[in-house]
Image (tube, rainbow, N blue to C red):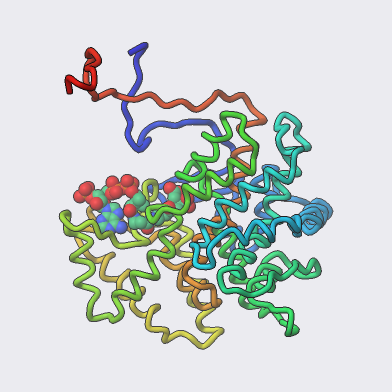
Amino acid sequence: GNGYFTYDPGFVSTAACESKITYIDGDKGVLLHGGYPIEQLAEQSDYLETCYLLLYGALPNATQKETFVNKVRMHTMVNDQMSTFFKGFRRDAHPMAIMCGVVGALSAFYHDSLDITDEKHREISAIRLIAKMPTLAAMTYKYTIGQPFMYPQNHLSYAENFLHMMFGNPCEQDKVNPVLAKAMDKIFLLHADHEQNASTSTVRLAGSTGANPFACISAGIAALWGPSHGGANEAVLDMLNEIGDASRIDEFVAKAKDKDDPFRLMGFGHRVYKNFDPRAKVMKQAADEVLAELGLENDPLLIIAKRLEQIALEDEYFIERKLYPNVDFYSGIILKAIGIPTSMFTVIFALGRTPGWIAHWNEMISGSYRIGRPRQLYTGPAQRDFVPLDKR
Ligand code: SDX
């Protein structure tokens, strides 16, 4: 080939970019956004404020926060043509399949987004994406259950609005439970960014070609869908349901350890965290609080989850490989308690991750960057002469 390069499958030891947005120390279990620990943000900030932090690199003052929240509010509706677009999907489509399509389709509505060299255009695209994701996510759900789409209500908070569009219907005055809205906001916040994970790296790679932000985020949604990444939250709940009873946990732990069996304990392990995932700790506490508030402490799935965590943490196989519960392990339990159907879990992750994706895209486009173009080790046949069809 031409020149030398390193061989690093899975990018285990290759930094692909510089970034100021998020810092992770995987050995210590530290996660900082703009320098602020995730535990403090989860406790004292809220989702939209954290979005601001990711996009602008600093916490907003009161006026900046109000202006930002109002800007997001102004953009919650989607073009009415969108409702026709949804109708092309089967009702039983997986919500992530619909999301890949409808988010990508936003590029067809906002032609100004195609000029990515203009900072103002990039900013408005970021605001539009953050504002419209809850609307599109809720429309996806409503479409799959055959209920009419609900319009956003801009007097509600971001999380309340999402729950209103998910669970409200035109026949009833719905009232959003503030406890559930707070938990929802925390889930969004805990997913907001995680530096160069597979989906964010996908957004950056797509963005490095100069593609528009809606197309890039749609690529990120596709990458997030897989069970090794964001799809794990849905897979965790499927797994807990399949285990069904605490007496069967040992059997599943044995399967996960068996190298001839492709089964893995969903919600365990992480490429970077080799101590614990700090988000999982916050999530676990939030799960306890929400279930207590709703009187669901004895939820059988929660009991299985806790027992499974305990057994795995004491097992040599998991200790040796430093496999701890990750963010997806406890989020599903809270989402289930809130009433979110399992097939929507990964959509919630996508919604929460949108500011991270767009902040990384914007950071790349505003700085100096080159098209992403990995190399390969060729292992195919050496050069040979073409054989005519009648000689094969
Ligand atoms: C997310 O990267 C991010 O930041 C992602 C994320 C984000 O916010 O963006 O944090 C979100 O994607 C969380 C991860 C969700 N995925 C899962 O919960 C699925 C289950 N976990 C795994 O498949 C796995 O642990 C990964 C994908 C998370 C990490 O994969 P790596 O880094 O490539 O690690 P590996 O597969 O090489 O595992 C190392 C060893 C292997 O054993 P040995 O061959 O060395 O004997 O650990 C074993 C693996 O077989 N292993 C597991 C396991 N995870 C790893 N064994 C059993 N159960 C598991 N879950």
Q: Nearer the viewer, residue 45 or 78?
A: 78
Q: Is 9 left, or right, of 117 in this rendering?
A: left
Q: Is 171 left, or right, of 185 in this rendering?
A: right
User: Which residue corresponds to the image point at 47% horizontal and 70% vertical from the top-left?
Assistant: 342
Q: Position of residue 188 (x, y in %)?
A: 59, 61
Answer above or below: position of 18 versus 4: below
Q: Nearer the viewer, residue 390 or 106?
A: 390
Q: Position of residue 29 (x, y in %)?
A: 43, 52
Answer above or below: position of 146 versus 72: below
User: Which residue corresponds to the image point at 24% horizontal and 74% vertical from the top-left?
Assistant: 249
Answer above or below: position of 272 versus 330: above
Q: Is 324 left, or right, of 118 in this rendering?
A: left
Farthest residue, direction front: 390
Answer above or below: position of 98 versus 308: above
User: Which residue corresponds to the image point at 44% horizontal and 62% vertical from the top-left?
Assistant: 328
Quadrant assignment, res 311: bottom left
From this viewpoint, is residue 257 visible?
A: yes
From this viewpoint, is residue 30 visible?
A: no
Q: Position of residue 73 (x, y in %)?
A: 78, 59
Q: Position of residue 44 (x, y in %)?
A: 65, 63
Quadrant assignment, res 382: top left
